[in-house]
Amino acid sequence: MRAARLGSAIVMGLAIGATATGVAAQAAGAAAVNLCGQAQGGSPATDVTEGVAESNSAMHAFQESSNVTLSGPLAVDITQPGNYPTTYNSTASLATSSIPLGTAVDSYLAYSDPVGKPTAFVRYAATLTFATPILGVIVQSTKLTSSDGSVGNPTTHYSTNPFRGLELGTSPGSDSVEFLSPTTLHVDVNTNMDIDSIRVITAGSPSGATTFTGVSPHYTEVAPDGGLFTFGTPFYGSMGGSHLNKPMVGGSEACGTAGYWTVATDGGIFAFGNAGFYGSTGNITLNKPVVGMAATPDGKGYWLVATDGGIFAYGDANFYGSTGAIHLNKPIVGMAATPDGRGYWLVASDGGIFAYGDANFYGSTGNIALNKPIVGMAAAPDGQGYLLVASDGGIFAYGDAKFLGSTGNIKLNQPIVAMKATPDGLGYWLIATDGGVFAYGDAPFLGSMVGTSLNQPILGAF
């Protein structure tokens, strides 16, 4: 049954968003850490030993200390590489370095603690963007333990397990750290019997306690006239009520910033909040219209995709391939990026999947007779699977993406046009053209536009 609760009201085609339920409000002057993917932030933990805060869906992150002046040099494993992105996936890639005494620093700990000490690895992939530049990263167990006293939280009980750090490598079950920018890290860890921990040291912030943003469940509906309707997240503006050359078809959040983009069929990009404008195809004659976009994990770039599978990369988004020169059986209808931003998938209306960069192929409906066409997709948070959604709300799960329900056997008032997965990958929302929202798994219902007179139907969501 469709929930009929209303979440916002139209004002000249704009949406005054529903209250930012569950989103940490940043105190004036306070630093903020933006988390994307499988990470959740909170207050300092009292105990970070194995088995205390078990979760198979998210790493835990908290600020250990704020604006502490180092009384001696602090040994770290990684410092600013100068070139981005730079990946650290072996012990040989680490440096013997230290942050000088007298430096004012903030310290953060992120760690994974899977449920029940499993023998099989549980993968966690997360992107962390800090308010001040990263000065050093500690991943080795010995250095983690030796730095607990100087930059750790004095009330936290830390693990003394000799395997509490990361095991860097490229083989299955290994861990890696990637510098995406001077303030952004992507962490990919595989954990089983022991916790995996990483300590991030940033330049000191005198503003006090840090807030964590970006991981609370939320969704935004997009209308072709540029109207945006936000639920569980702040409203930063829209093009509703403005003259557009071409209709809007979708958008994307700018991870690491308080903002988002929307995209039109001519590839015009509209940036709101703190999202940066990195380029568009708005003044280019396209072979085929743009149908979607995806953002890089640090929020400093994006890809646009056209119905022929042509890819347009801007900012720090790299081009990894396209179907622009390939004859397609059916048009491309959407795309999704991998968690580290080094690959992406394109999906066609017959469910055909095209994988590029480090995106792996896990299956498709390309050779299946579908009741209704595919209209969108969502990636699993660890990048090892994806979900496809059809216009009747049928869900097709591949890789480690989980099927949690669908509207495939329900008579809908209006067709489904988009989907979005929850940050932990254990839920998702389906969005219909009337703004109806269908929530599954741990995805909460935060409101919809059902019962409200829309100027134009919903065509996308992010």
Image: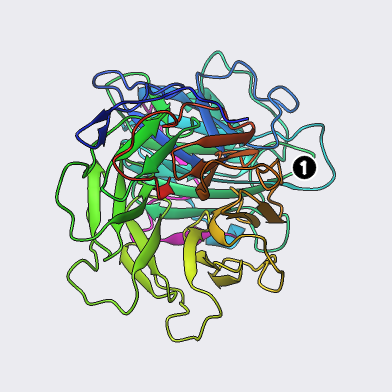
- Foreground of the two, 50 or 440: 440
Question: In the image, residue 68 lies at what x, y percent?
Answer: 36, 23
Disc 1 target residue:
192
Image quadrant of residue 257? top left
The secondary structure that dominates the magenta segment is loop
Quadrant holding the C terminus: top left
User: Does residue 30 appear left or right of residue 189 in this picture?
Assistant: left
10 shown above or below 190: above
Q: What residue do we see at 31% from left, 26% from top?
A: 9
The one of 345 and 71 positioned closer to us in this rendering: 345
Examine the structure image and report whether residue 358 is included in the region drawn in magenta.
no
The answer to whether residue 317 is seen in the rendering is: no
The x and y percentages for residue 78 are: 47, 50
Q: Is residue 59 above or below residue 303?
A: above
Q: Is residue 87 magenta?
A: yes
Residue 299 visible within the image: yes
At 44% from the left and 38% from the top, the residue drawn is: 435
Q: Hey, which residue is sitting farthest right in the picture? A: 119
Residue at 35% in and 26% down: 8
Q: Secondary structure at mark 1?
A: loop
Closer to us: 77 or 333: 333
| Residue 94 image point, x, y percent | 52, 56
Q: Which contiguous range is marked in magenta?
A: 68-89
On screen, residue 248 versus residue 7, left or right, reads: left
Please, what is the three-letter code of the amino acid marked with disc 1? Asn
Return the x and y of residue 312 as percentages of the image width and height: 34, 70
Q: Residue furthest top?
A: 155
Q: Residue furthest left?
A: 243
